[in-house]
Image: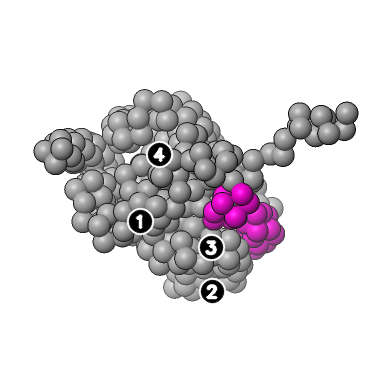
Amino acid sequence: MNGQAKLSHPRAFYGWFVVAAAFAVTFVGFGSAYTFSAFVEPLQHDFGASRGSVSLVFSLAGFLYFGLGIISGPLADRLGSRPFAVAGMILTGVGLAAASAAQSLAQVYVAYGLGVGLGMGCAYVPAIGAVQRWFVRRRGFASGIAVSGIGVGTLAMPPLASLLIGLLGWRGAYLALGALAVVLGGGLALLIENDPRRRGLGPDGDPPQSTTPMALPEGAGVREAIRSTRFIGLYAACLICAFGVFIPFVHLVPYARDHGIAPSSAVWLLAVIGVGSTAGRFFLGGLADRMGRELSLLLMFIGMALALAMWAISTTVWPLVVFAFVYGVFYGGWVAVLPAVVMDYFGGRNVSGLIGILYTSVAFGTLIGPSAAGFAFDFSHSYTLPILLSVGANILAAMIVAATSSAAVRKTALQR
């Protein structure tokens, strides 16, 4: 009787624990990073800095946490993702704590930029790459849950940061967020594992012998992949898109304040992005498994372009709420689908490394976009130009994905 009871309650598939750990890493890491908009005005006030100069703090961190995946990703493929995820969470916490003690904006650049940037650069790509190996049939859904930590973090952390700033000042708020990164993020990152075969499993919990070749760590070599039409097109699309994709995370709160919206209401716009982002990662990630992940990626670019066009004409609370939610949905879907598309194209042998290389495109866009938008505001006292350029960038990215996909299909047909 006991044996039958045990058989009727099989052990939970460990891949979902890996997903939960990756969720924690993205929740704490990106949630802390995306609170930055709440800190723009206090940093401007205390250091007498321009909006462009303060925005550069986020741009430097973003450049590092996306750009360093090119190093941490391949190392995680060889050495395992867990040590990089744990070390990354510790570095993130130390960087936030160091930023709390900064006596100049330059010190914030070093503490926040290097600490959060290096920390998330170590943690993000290895954590997300590990998830891809544990799933095939539900890869889009699992990837969506893992990266939905970014959305939930964007929902929960900016209001928390605003509350902490009110209670403790911006320095105390950074110190508290740093402690959260080490304890929660670092602790749960210990659950990450790279390979289901070490537990006698295949992806999706199947027996190892029943998996398809794509499910095992086989696939294209790095050099072969990065020379392919599909990778080049994907890289170009993400590079162009990334110039505008993070502008709302830095400038939406100051934009709302410039239009007379109270600080307590303005910071909640970031939370609304988080709500939409979480919905997009869960639902659009799962939908992509059914309608095709490549087509879904193209639709994410178009959706972000339409949302940003809404932002350009929104000056009161409720239109901005609608923009924030719609933008969050498509941004969240983009983040969820992108790693799964890489796995679909090139297999699992070098998936973390290839995701890391791809994310260097996002790094360059993030380095330039938010800070350029800040300096554009300092010059013109308006965000209209950077917003409209962001609309055009997403439309161009969609066109590139469509064109390179068609070229790859034609090439495959000719080879047959």
Neighbours of disc 2 within 10 Å: few (<14), some (14-19), many (20+)? few
Q: Earlier in the sequence, mark 3 or mark 4?
A: 3
Q: Earlier in the sequence, mark 3 or mark 2?
A: 3
**Magenta part of the chain:** 175-200
Neighbours of disc 3 within 10 Å: few (<14), some (14-19), many (20+)? some
Q: In the rendered structure, are the residues bearing label 3 and label 1 in contact, judged by CB atoms less than 8 Å apart?
A: no
Farthest residue, direction right: 1
Residue 343, given in percent of the width and then of the height, sits at 38, 46
Residue topped by disc 1: 354
Q: Amino acid at mark 2?
A: Gln
Residue 79, given in percent of the width and then of the height, sits at 51, 67
274 or 301: nearer the eye?
Answer: 301
Q: Is residue 295 above or below residue 124?
A: above
Residue ID at (47%, 30%): 286
SS for tag 4? helix
Is residue 172 visible in the rendered structure shown here? no
Cα separation between marks 3 and 2 = 38 Å
Q: Is residue 224 above or below residue 266?
A: below
| Left or right for 19, reference 290 | right
Q: Amino acid at mark 1?
A: Leu
Residue topped by disc 4: 337
Residue topped by disc 3: 80
Residue 351, given in percent of the width and then of the height, sits at 40, 53
Residue ID at (42%, 35%): 333
Neighbours of disc 1 within 10 Å: few (<14), some (14-19), many (20+)? many
Q: Amino acid at mark 4?
A: Val
Viewer-nearest of discs 4 and 2: 4
The circle drawn on residue 103 is: 2
Q: In the rendered structure, are the residues bearing label 1 and label 4 in contact, judged by CB atoms less than 8 Å apart?
A: no
